Image (spheres, rainbow, N blue to C red):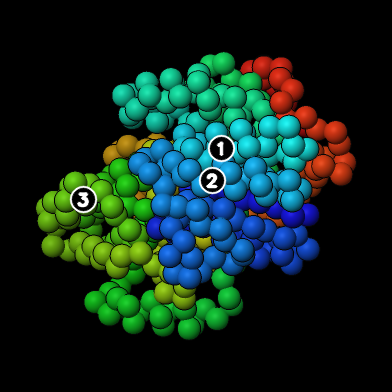
């Protein structure tokens, strides 16, 4: 099949959706499916972004809504050449543009919300929620309603999506999600990481990897680390906070928390990690820590599992139940007591059990989140809607989703 992906940006600094797209594209190519991406990045950045497929950058986009006057005309002229179109993310111009441009075409489109319907956002940003509610009534609900299917990365994301806005009408599907395992050269990756952070020496560490953003709970980790340092005896691991931080006020808040930590604590800020150094950091970590307030999936969680590193996460990371049930990590509430319990649980685990958890992490990744399975799941899910297999009409109104609706 010929697949068209429409996304605001493929810049890896913007987190999960771009990272997931980068991971799955080469695997879809291996399966014989051709991917083209349309983003709202500027054309001058195409070489810099190094995306592993044909990339049409139609930016610059304007404002937080990411409006591009070039997008809809491009879609009207080209979308019929594809077997399926995917909208990645909500609340921006590209979703409305896809719905409008594909009206009357046989080409189906699918929507990945990427967690953007989670009710946490309503509680955390009530003023923004009012704006979103207006946009939902005017536009976004129609984008979802007219999609061939709305694709969720786990059942918990699907369940939560029903709670934020009404009316909610769409065809739901849950697809596998995950990432690609790294190259097997573990020693070279560890060496690349150690060269980047010589100040770490051989000290064990806990790794926070991802966008450093208030929803990710890095402040909870710093506070819990400080409390643990004042109450626990013996040596403690360092904490590595790895990732981009565009919120300068939040960065300043974290720096103040770090300044107040006891002297036995060590916090390292290596910035955004990519390539061998990133995989080396994941491999060498004692554990990956993400006390997030909202995470529809968590690509970095899957990356940790891919190298056999146990994960310490909150119950707001939507795949927490699978991780706990398979013994690949621990999950607690997304508050300070819960984050402290995560660290205390981990410090109490004997060395032999930690090795068992590493094996469980590796096993879980290959059973659920390995990119080959993800790619096959996506193709199997969208195939019944393809132009060649059904007379799908994206502008038929579907019935509302009942709370007891079971996913077929």
Instruction: Look at the image and tell me whether residue 41 can be seen.
Output: yes
Identify the mark nearer the N-term, 1 or 3: 1
Report the side of 69 relative to 253 (left or right): right
Q: Position of residue 139 (x, y in %)?
A: 52, 25
First of labels 2, 3 by sequence position = 2
- Are the two marked residues, 1 and 3, in contact with CB atoms closer than 8 angstroms? no
Question: Real-space Cα distance between discs 1 and 3?
Answer: 32 Å
Quadrant placement of the C terminus: top right
Residue identifier under label 2: 71
Q: Which mark is residue 303?
A: none
- Locate the N terminus by quadrant: bottom right
Residue assigned mark 1: 97
The residue at which mark 3 appears reads as 248
Q: Position of residue 142 (x, y in %)?
A: 59, 24
Query: What residue is drawn where x is 54% and y is 65%?
Result: 51
Asked if residue 154 is positioned above or below residue 49 in the image, the reply reads above
Q: Tell me residue 277's x, y (percent).
A: 42, 74
């Amino acid at each position: 099949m010929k697949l068209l992906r429409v996304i605001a940006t493929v810049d890896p600094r913007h987190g999960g959706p771009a990272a997931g797209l980068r991971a799955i594209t080469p695997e879809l190519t291996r399966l014989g499916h051709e991917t083209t991406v349309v983003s709202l990045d500027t054309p001058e950045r195409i070489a810099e972004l190094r995306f592993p497929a044909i990339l049409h950058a139609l930016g610059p986009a304007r404002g937080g809504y990411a409006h591009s006057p070039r997008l809809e005309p491009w879609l009207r002229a080209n979308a019929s050449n594809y077997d399926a179109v995917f909208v990645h993310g909500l609340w921006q111009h590209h979703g409305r543009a896809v719905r409008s441009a594909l009206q009357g075409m046989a080409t189906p489109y699918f929507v990945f919300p990427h967690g953007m319907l989670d009710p946490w956002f309503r509680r955390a940003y009530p003023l923004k929620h009012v704006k979103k509610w207006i946009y939902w009534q005017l536009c976004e609900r129609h984008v979802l309603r007219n999609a061939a299917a709305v694709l969720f990365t786990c059942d918990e994301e699907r369940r939560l999506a029903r709670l934020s806005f009404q009316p909610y009408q769409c065809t739901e599907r849950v697809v596998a999600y995950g990432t690609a395992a790294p190259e097997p050269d573990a020693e070279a990756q560890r060496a690349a990481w150690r060269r980047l952070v010589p100040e770490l020496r051989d000290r064990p560490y806990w790794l926070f990897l991802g966008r450093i953003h208030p929803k990710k709970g890095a402040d909870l980790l710093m506070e819990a680390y400080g409390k643990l340092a004042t109450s626990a005896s013996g040596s403690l691991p360092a904490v590595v906070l790895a990732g981009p931080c565009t919120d300068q006020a939040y960065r300043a808040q974290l720096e103040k928390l770090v300044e107040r930590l006891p002297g036995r604590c060590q916090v390292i800020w290596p910035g955004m990690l990519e390539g061998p150094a990133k995989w080396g950091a994941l491999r060498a970590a004692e554990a990956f820590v993400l006390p997030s307030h909202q995470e529809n999936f968590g690509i970095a969680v899957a990356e940790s599992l891919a190298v056999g590193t146990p994960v310490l996460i909150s119950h707001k990371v939507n795949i927490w139940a699978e991780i706990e049930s398979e013994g690949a990590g621990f999950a607690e509430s997304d508050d300070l007591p819960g984050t402290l319990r995560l660290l205390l649980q981990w410090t109490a685990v004997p060395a032999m059990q930690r090795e068992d958890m590493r094996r469980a992490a590796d096993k879980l990744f290959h059973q659920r989140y390995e990119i080959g399975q993800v790619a096959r799941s996506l193709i199997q899910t969208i195939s019944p809607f393809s132009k060649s297999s059904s007379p799908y009409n994206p502008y038929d109104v579907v019935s509302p989703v009942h709370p007891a609706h079971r996913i077929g």
